[in-house]
Image (cartoon, rainbow, N blue to C red):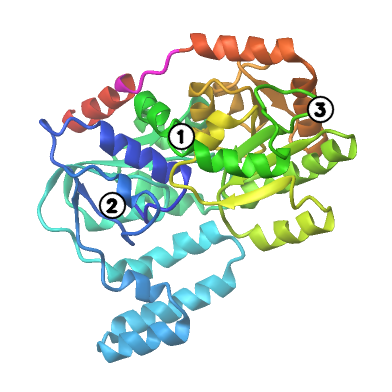
């Protein structure tokens, strides 16, 4: 994996590692950069391999990396860093740039010692490429967490790597269908393992840190004793997502503006960070929503915020399969999710959540409906309480792949 920063795939990996039967399996974890908010959640049984020396150097500034590589006498990697800079300028698409850079960047990695029963690249592109080119294993598995049709990739490059995998795992039926259509030669390799979540862990974590959430709420509610959605209390909305274009936080901000314009007293918390933060902060000030739309930053434990929400909102333009939505379902929060391609794998409209058009107006209408309709909120919550979550079934699928 690249790292254990705050993202859905990273959270999925940590949860998977916490569910493995270590009486039967020994697990090494290789991170390109051993850092991120989820590092502290790694189980002690996992053997964290040493970090590659030159990965971080190759991803630093051109001048800085060249200086470091020259000091170490790595003329080969200096050439690779120069090629990397040219590729970055050539391609507007970050996905294509990553594809074309791998043949140079891979020289920063040594082949791992030993031979494994199975090697898993737990994210599309570089982690999969690493497993193909730098690991010796009886079985090789690539794990795809996104809707591949939304990536601007060179299919021929991806096809060459897929041909060296034994299995291509993805997280939803829709993602699997897309992969089979895009790469028909590998149709038989595509398997579905839904994101594993640990219900007991999430519920325990949701009961932690509630005081911090309440302190912020009290500032806005001016000490109101809030127990339900009423005209005198702010409606608490929560979104857990990166501040990036695919996650649609800009759509959420516009929907917030419409709700406030129409007199709805809301507090919308966004848990996460990302490249759109500065742009969003500017628009929040422009709309005078500083106390209504709160960018809370990354939280290693977002669950108290989710549990505290009156409505959970997922405003994404596209998703592989949203882990945050699954967690909100587990915590039985009324959910509004946009009509991204895989949403029907998670939300039955009007049954366990609402599916909104991918637009500010679509979000506004669905959120407004939930605020105004107490019976609908109760029905969604009651239906969610009847749903069962079983991660053990999914991890058994992985064991079968590993053991053949």
Name which residue lies at 50% across and 24% down.
331
**Other residues around mark 1 within 10 Å, as few (<14) / some (14–19) / many (≥20):** few
Q: Which residue is mark 1?
A: 184
Counting from the top left corner in percent of width and height, residue 189 is at: 35, 32
Query: Of marks 2 and 1, which one's residue comes earlier in the chain?
Result: 2
x then y, percent, for residue 318: 62, 39
The part of the image, by quadrant, that contains residue 266 is top right
Q: Earlier in the sequence, mark 3 or mark 2?
A: 2
Residue 325 at x, y percent in the picture: 55, 30
Helix, strand or loop at mark 3: helix
Q: Is residue 389 covered in magenta?
A: yes
**Residue 365, label in figure:** 3
The residue lying toward the viewer, choosing from 374 and 119, is 374
Q: Are marks 3 and 2 in contact (CB under 8 Å)?
A: no
Give the mark toward the camera: 3 or 2.
3
Q: Quadrant of the C terminus?
A: top left
- Asked if residue 166 can be seen in this view, the reply is no
Tell me the distance, in whole angstroms, between the alpha carbons under discs 2 and 1.
20 Å
What kind of element bears circle 1?
A: helix
8, 321: nearer the viewer: 8
User: Do callouts 2 and 1 mark residues in contact (Cβ within 8 Å)?
Assistant: no
Residue 371 in the image, given as x and y percentages of width and height: 76, 23
Magenta stretch: includes residue 251: no
Secondary structure, magenta segment, majority class = loop
Q: What label sits on residue 132 in the rendered view?
A: 2
């Amino acid at each position: 994996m690249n790292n254990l920063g705050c993202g859905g795939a990273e959270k999925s990996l940590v949860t998977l590692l916490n569910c493995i039967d270590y009486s039967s399996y020994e697990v090494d974890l290789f991170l390109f950069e051993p850092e991120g908010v989820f590092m502290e959640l790694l189980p002690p049984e996992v053997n964290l391999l040493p970090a590659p020396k030159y990965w971080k150097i190759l991803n630093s500034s051109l001048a800085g990396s060249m200086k470091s590589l020259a000091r170490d006498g790595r003329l080969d990697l200096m050439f690779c860093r120069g090629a990397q800079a040219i590729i970055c300028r050539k391609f507007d698409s970050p996905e294509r740039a990553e594809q074309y850079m791998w043949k140079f960047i891979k020289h920063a990695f040594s082949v791992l010692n030993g031979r494994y029963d199975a090697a898993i690249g737990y994210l599309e592109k570089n982690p999969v490429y690493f497993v193909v080119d730098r690991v010796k294993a009886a079985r090789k598995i690539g794990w795809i967490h996104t809707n591949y049709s939304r990536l601007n990739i060179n299919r021929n490059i991806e096809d060459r790597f897929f041909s060296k995998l034994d299995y291509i795992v993805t997280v939803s039926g829709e993602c699997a269908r897309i992969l089979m259509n895009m790469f028909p030669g590998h149709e038989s390799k595509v398997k579905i393992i839904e994101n594993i979540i640990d219900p007991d862990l999430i519920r325990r974590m949701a009961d932690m840190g509630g005081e911090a959430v309440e302190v912020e709420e009290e500032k806005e509610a001016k000490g109101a004793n809030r127990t339900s959605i009423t005209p005198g209390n702010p409606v608490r909305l929560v979104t857990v997502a990166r501040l990036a274009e695919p996650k649609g936080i800009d759509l959420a901000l516009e929907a917030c503006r419409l709700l406030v314009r129409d007199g709805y007293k809301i507090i919308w918390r966004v848990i996460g960070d990302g490249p759109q933060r500065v742009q969003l902060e500017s628009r929040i000030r422009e709309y005078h929503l500083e106390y209504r739309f709160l960018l809370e930053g990354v939280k290693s434990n977002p669950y108290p915020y989710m549990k505290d929400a009156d409505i959970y909102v997922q405003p994404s333009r596209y998703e592989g399969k949203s882990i945050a939505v699954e967690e909100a379902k587990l915590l039985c929060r009324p959910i509004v999710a946009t009509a991204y391609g895989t949403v029907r794998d998670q939300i039955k409209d009007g049954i366990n959540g609402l599916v909104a058009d991918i637009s500010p107006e679509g979000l506004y209408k669905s959120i407004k409906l939930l605020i105004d309709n107490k019976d609908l909120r109760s029905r969604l919550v009651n239906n969610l309480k009847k749903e069962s979550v079983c991660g053990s079934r999914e991890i058994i699928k992985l064991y079968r792949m590993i053991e053949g």
